[in-house]
Structures are given as C-alpha cells and as structure tokens.
Amino acid sequence: MPIWPDKWFVSTPKVGLSRSKATQTHMKHLLIASVAGFWCLVVTAAPTAAPVRAEIEALLNQLQVSGCQFNRNGSWYSGSEAKQHLLRKLEYIEGRGTIQSTEQFIELAASKSSFSGRAYLVKCAGQAPVASQVWLIQQLAVVRGVILPVSLNVISSYVSSQKIKVTFSHAFLGGSLAV
C-alpha cells in the first residue's frame, strides 16, 4: 500500500475524482504557484545599473585605500574588510531589488548594521570617529569630483534632511563643521 499520496495530499479529494486525479490537480496548482513565485523574484531582482554599481565600487575603493578603520557592531575593521562586508550587503540588497543610486546604497547598506541597528563609524588617523554615512557622502563627493566645500554643503543638507546630528572636522579646511 503506497504511503506517499496520503503524505502529500493535504485536503480531501474532490467528489467524483479519483485520488490520483486529485493528486495530479494538486501538483498542477503547486507547479503553477512555484513558477509564478520564481517569475516574481526574477522580475523584482534586477541588477543595479552599471554606472551606479561602478560609483559604489569606486566609493568602496576609497574606503579600502584610505587607511581608515570601520566600526561595525563595536568592533574595528580595516578598510579592506569593510569593503568586503559592504559588497556582501550590496549583493544581498540587489537580490531583493535594484539600488537606484549610490546615496540609496549608503542609506540602506552602509550607514548602520541591519543586525543590531547600530550606526557604522569611520575613524581616520588622528581624527575622531564619524558616522559612516557622513564619511561616505564626503568621499562620494570626491569620487564625483565635486569641490570639497561644496561637498560639505551636500553633506550638511543630506544629514539635516535625515535629522542626524554629527560633528566632523577636515584638516584641509582647518576647522570643523557641526551639523
């Protein structure tokens, strides 16, 4: 006596159908649902546009070669380790949808831990740690070739719009900026 039809078959068979016909109908519905679910994943998980992806990778290269340290969940990591971690987060997010801009990547993946919710920090030699979001936006301005004082205005506007209170300094300016 075969056991498998009773194990797979959850509901009672429809009246007038043999058990094998009901099982076939059930399997057809299961197959259609599986194909539809797979199609939804394929459609929504589009890759990030090449220019955005290139800009993100250039930004992470800045982090890697900066000599700065990256704090994640209370532990300090090198720029190389931070880059690898953030690339893994980027791939995870890309598996669920498309990143529209580098700023969106910074907001979704590079500003805080998705595990603990704690903000990431960046600490460069001789300077106090700053929120990674601020540091990355400043470096994004460098990657884009924006003049530094303009980039500070961009940072100030962005951070203000996000209601984040930070203070950071930059040796080039010879002072500090409180946002």
Image (cartoon, helix red, strand yellow):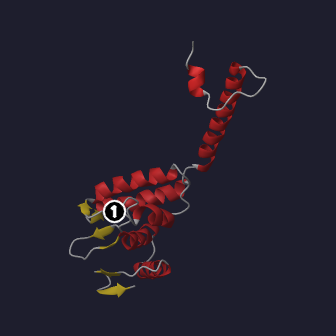
Quadrant housing the N terminus: top right
Quadrant housing the C terminus: bottom left
Secondary structure of the residue carrying tag 1 is helix
Seen in the picture, residue 22 relative to 131 is either above or below; the reply is above
Please give the name of the residue rendered at 68% of the width and 34% of the height, measured from the top-left corner. 32
Disc count in the image?
1
Image position, residue 169 (x, y; %): 31, 81
Image position, residue 101 (x, y; %): 53, 63
The front one of 151 and 30 is: 30
Q: Amino acid at mark 1?
A: Leu
Horizontal side, residue 117 vs residue 122: left or right: right
Image position, residue 142 (x, y; %): 41, 70
**Outermost residue to the right:** 16
Horizontal side, residue 89 vs residue 65: left or right: right
> Mark 1 highlights which residue?
63
Can you tell which quarter of the image residue 38 is in?
top right
The front one of 84 and 51 is: 84
The front one of 2 and 87 is: 2
